[in-house]
């Protein structure tokens, strides 16, 4: 099917930090994923995964488990691609 992806700016990513009922998003290689549904299932615990919320999760992720395939696990949770701060307008 046809899928469209959001253009996510750094400030939008920051807002989706999983706090105050907001969804938790995290970016990986220029792509943005909604990690909220995975929080209860993360083998390292919800708290650890939450550290990647609202930001680029690559560094934390690679420090802990570079062998885990982020894309395979969270592919269905892809919400969009990172763009520059003012590049989300059409
Ligand atoms: C374990 C997935 C992010 C910390 C695991 C495991 C998976 C996983 C599959 C089990 C790995 C294994 O046993 O070989 C993910 C995914 C992430 C993510 C898909 C995407 C966002 C993070 C982050 C942190 C973290 C950001 C830390 C800040 C840990 C820790 C374990 C773990 C400490 C080890 C748990 C244990 O063995 O007791 N994660 N993780 N993870 N994860 Fe993550």
Image (cartoon, rainbow, N blue to C red):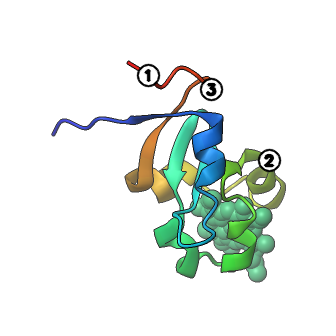
Q: Quadrant of residue 63?
A: bottom right
Q: Secondary structure at mark 2?
A: helix
Q: Quadrant of the N terminus?
A: top left
Please report the residue visible at 48 percent of the width from the left and 25 percent of the height from the top. 88
Q: Which mark is residue 9?
A: none
Q: Find residue 80 and report its image quarter.
A: top left
Which tag is nearer the camera, tag 1 or tag 2? Answer: 1
Closest to the camera, between mark 2 and mark 3, is 3
Q: Is residue 51 above or below residue 79?
A: below
Quadrant of ligand 1 in image:
bottom right
Q: Quick check: 65 left or right of 85?
A: right
Report the Cα–Cα distance between label 2 and label 3: 21 Å
Mark 1: secondary structure:
loop
Q: Is residue 2 above or below residue 46?
A: above
What's the residue at 51%, 50% (across, down)?
33
Up-down relation of residue 46 to residue 15 (above or below) = below
Residue occupying the point 64% across, 60% down: 17
Of label 1 and label 2, which has the lower sequence position? 2
User: Which label number is shown at residue 59?
Assistant: 2
Disc 3 under 8 Å from ligand 1? The reply is no
Foreground pick, 58 / 21: 21
Q: Which residue is mark 3?
A: 85
Q: Work out whether mark 2 precedes mark 3 in sequence or the reverse, and give the earlier one.
A: 2
- Neighbourhood count class around disc 3 (C-alpha, 10 Å): few under 14, some 14–19, many 20 upward: few
x and y percentages locating residue 52 in the rendered image: 71, 58
The residue carrying mark 1 is 89
Q: Quadrant of residue 31?
A: top right
State the CA–CA distance, disc 1 to disc 3.
10 Å
Left or right: residue 52 versus residue 27 is right
């Amino acid at each position: 099917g046809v899928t469209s992806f959001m253009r996510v700016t750094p400030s939008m990513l920051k807002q989706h930090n999983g706090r105050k009922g907001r969804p938790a998003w995290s970016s990986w290689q220029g792509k943005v994923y909604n990690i909220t549904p995975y929080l209860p299932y993360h083998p390292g615990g919800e708290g650890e995964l939450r550290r990647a919320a609202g930001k680029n999760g690559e560094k934390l992720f690679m420090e802990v488990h570079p062998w885990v395939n982020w894309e395979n696990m969270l592919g269905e949770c892809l919400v969009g691609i990172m763009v520059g701060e003012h590049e989300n307008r059409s």
